Amino acid sequence: MGLSILGATGSIGRQTLDVAEGLGLEISALAAGSSAQALETAARRFRPKIAILYDEKAAADLRGRLADTDVKVLSGMEGLLEAASLPQADTVLAAMSGAVGLRPALAAIEAGKKLALANKETLVCAGRLVTAAAEAAGVPLLPVDSEHSAIFQCLQGQGEVKRILLTASGGPFRNHSAEELKHVTREDALRHPNWSMGPKITVDSATLMNKGLEFIEAMHLFRVPPEKIKVLIHPQSVVHSAVEFADGAVIAQLGSPDMRLPIQLALTWPERKPCPAPALDLTKTAPLSFAEPDLERFPCLGLAMDCAKRPETADGAVMNAANEEAVRAFLEGRIGFTQIYEIVSRTLEALSGRPGRTLEEILGSDEEARRLSKACLSSIS
Ligand code: NDP
Ligand code: MG
């Protein structure tokens, strides 16, 4: 059986293709947003049944490029939903960036696929809906995010959890003062000290919103209340996360900062296979340190931890949508770094408490939050 990759041209998608090649997996579908050339290259290398570009024009371009092959080219949300539920695949790796990944993730679950989930925004927007759907369909949700892969590994065969210790590198501005943060540039934010990732998650790592999204992701994946999750700043990114159990024992997963390991594990679980990621040499790592996060300098983390307390509302979806719009504006040079928080908090203040039980409610709140944050953006940029 095969693997379908959503977000195949991105940082996670490209690493997944390398891992899949190493494992000799068959690729059933490849999907991306608008990168026709990159998707053509991947489609020629892996010959999927279908290739999808969300953007109609780019899909038409791709159709022309692949005219000499038997790869079928589709477009739009319909195409993504078809990729997610293709009968030839037994596993879907969801690595699109943003809330646009939510409907395809649900479609994969409903079609009974194993879901290897990198797209954390899906759980931030609709964690209850997605985990309930996976349980109802009897399909596993396999975390790709390195921290959640670590927690997943620590939990195997263990008893009652006291706390999850969610580690964070602290990003490129870990030691910046509040004043210095006001003047950092897009280029500064895109220079992550330990990981090489797509632009949106790299900015999220700099604001610590990424850790906030991961806080909500962990709460849903592992069904723990927010008060049992503790964020620790660990600049070396060697301990990918840990779990403290009822007796006080702490089990951690360590490794080099290379996403190919968690990607591969999500694809081979419950087996482990040799992986191309460099081995961890504990005699050569810098001394490991752990510290409390500073919620005053990095208020996005506090916002997300607060949203986590209201899982029955659409607050996660509202916060995520506002953050997506604000990060896009920051990357386009329209707002400063600290204004990301301003946009997200103003949008949340206005829309907090909307119900978030159904997909319609969640998508409606996502749309409303984008409308409002764009209005906020045009008033300040
Ligand atoms: P990238 O920006 O590198 O890649 C995003 C991918 O999503 C691209 O293939 C892009 O296609 C595709 N995409 C964007 N919009 C759409 C759309 N509307 N329809 C279909 N595809 C779309 O991101 P990353 O790979 O860094 O991250 C992907 C996800 O994985 C995110 O949710 C992130 O939080 C998560 N993650 C990433 C990690 C990392 O190390 N990179 C670590 C842990 C989690 P196109 O090229 O055409 O725009
Ligand atoms: Mg992570």
Image (cartoon, grey):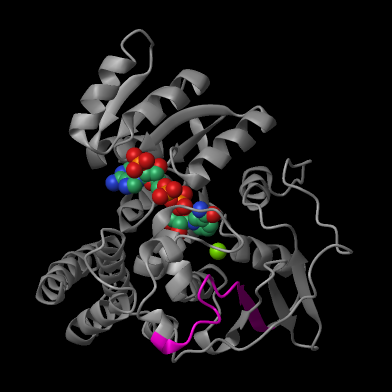
Please say if 263 is above or below 85.
Answer: below
Which residue is at a point 38% across and 36% down the rendered structure image?
31
- The region drawn magenta spans 162-179
Camera-nearest residue between 117 and 36? 36
Which quadrant of the structure image shows residue 132?
bottom left
Q: In this view, does 94 lie to the left or right of 248?
A: left
- Point out the residue furthest to the top here: 68
Task: Say left or right for 304 vs 225.
Answer: left
From the viewer's perspective, is 288 left or right of 97? Answer: right
Q: In this view, does 114 lie above or below 310?
A: above
Question: Which residue is drawn at the image coordinates 33% and 20% (left, top)?
Answer: 72
Asked if the stretch drawn in magenta spans residue 305, the answer is no
* Residue occupying the far right of the picture: 283
In the image, residue 72 sits, relative to residue 168, either above or below, namely above
Expressed as whole percent of the image width and height from the top left, the position of residue 152 reads: 66, 64
Residue at 76% from the left image edge and 48% from the top image edge: 278
Relative image position of residue 159 (x, y in whole percent): 75, 77
Q: Position of residue 233 (x, y in %)?
A: 62, 80
- Residue 109 in sight: no
